[in-house]
Image (cartoon, grey):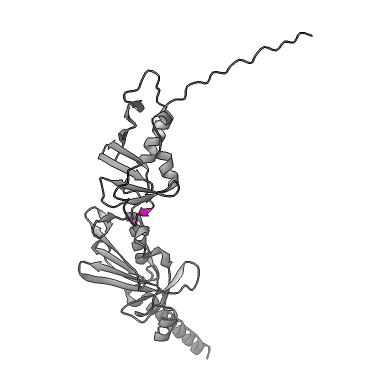
Amino acid sequence: MERHHTALAALLALQLLVIAGIWMFADGGSASEPHRLVAFERDAVSAIDIDDRTTTVRIERTSDGWALPGEEVLPVDDAKVATLLDKLEQAEAPWPVATSESSAERFEVTAENYQRRVRLFDGDDQAAEVFFGTSPGFRKVHARLADTSDVYAVAFANFEASIAAEDWLDKTLLQPKGAISAITRKTGYTITQADAAWTLTDASTTETLNQDTARDLASKLANLRVLGRAEAAPAADAVALMTFDIVAEGGPLQLSFYRAAEEGDFLLGSDRFGAYFRVSEYIGEGLNLDRQALLVSPPTTETPAPAVNEAS
């Protein structure tokens, strides 16, 4: 009898091992290779469409990186696109949380009702289509592939698939390319750099350039970031508040700053793009330095106090 029980126990253990093996290696995977939500050839992705059923943003791969298509192609922040593709590529989906049509409707991952849809394209062919819906918890979202009824809870947040083109725009698109060697403000001044020192062109004998101020100006232009694309260009008769001609290692650049009101964002145009962009008031004001502001302030001479008669 004892021998019989031992044989049954061994058989049960073997069955459990077989079941565990089948579960671990289903779909050709293993315990060390978790099931992924979506499989795609990353280098083959040529375009990404993101929509919420009312608004769609399209991002396309170009020879210069990712870009927003349109009348004028504008560069996209490549790091943000890489992060999105990382999230899709690494999203683990070990077991579906639901498989029924009613559950898909409740979790908002149907073709008729979803919070986000991400489509990946390889040329004219759609390589993947994923619906994202409600959130079951922090940094989690329900997701479903278009060609399956399985719904998963994956590590993702819908804001990471923004439908606003402005969120994808490369905010550094109007930075000079390479080190700056000269800055000219029209009707103002020209400063040039050589051997780590800045020089004011045509300086008079009483004018001394403040090196810290010159370096700060060059740094602000080198690190210029826009807020986004402007909805409209300046008025036809608008005159730029300040225009800079910049000589940089990667080529010249002209930047023209406009302001419609005494307060608020600046509008920025350039000879690099036809579009205009918004720049924060803080950045614009920091660049609005006239010639006098670049100079070392002359030492102040104090008028001696009148003598006090202390005679008693």
Residue 286, position as x, y percentages in the image: 43, 40
Asked if residue 156 shows in the view, the reply is: no
Q: Residue at x 44, y 49 (%)?
A: 264
Q: Tell me, yes or no, whether the highlighted magenta stretch contains residue 229.
A: yes
Residue 75, position as x, y percentages in the image: 29, 54
Residue 97, position as x, y percentages in the image: 44, 79
Residue 67, position as x, y percentages in the image: 27, 57
Q: Nearer the viewer, residue 94 or 297?
A: 297
* Total count of labels: 0
Q: Please tell me whether the stretch drawn in magenta is mainly helix, strand or loop.
A: loop
Q: Is residue 267 above or below residue 40?
A: above
Q: Is residue 245 above or below residue 39?
A: above
Q: Nearer the viewer, residue 297 or 132?
A: 297
Q: Residue at x 32, y 77 (%)?
A: 146
Q: Residue furthest left?
A: 124
Q: Quadrant of residue 222?
A: top left
Magenta-tinted stretch: 227-233
Q: Quadrant of residue 243?
A: top left
Q: Is residue 95 above or below residue 244?
A: below
Asked if residue 140 shows in the view, the reply is: yes
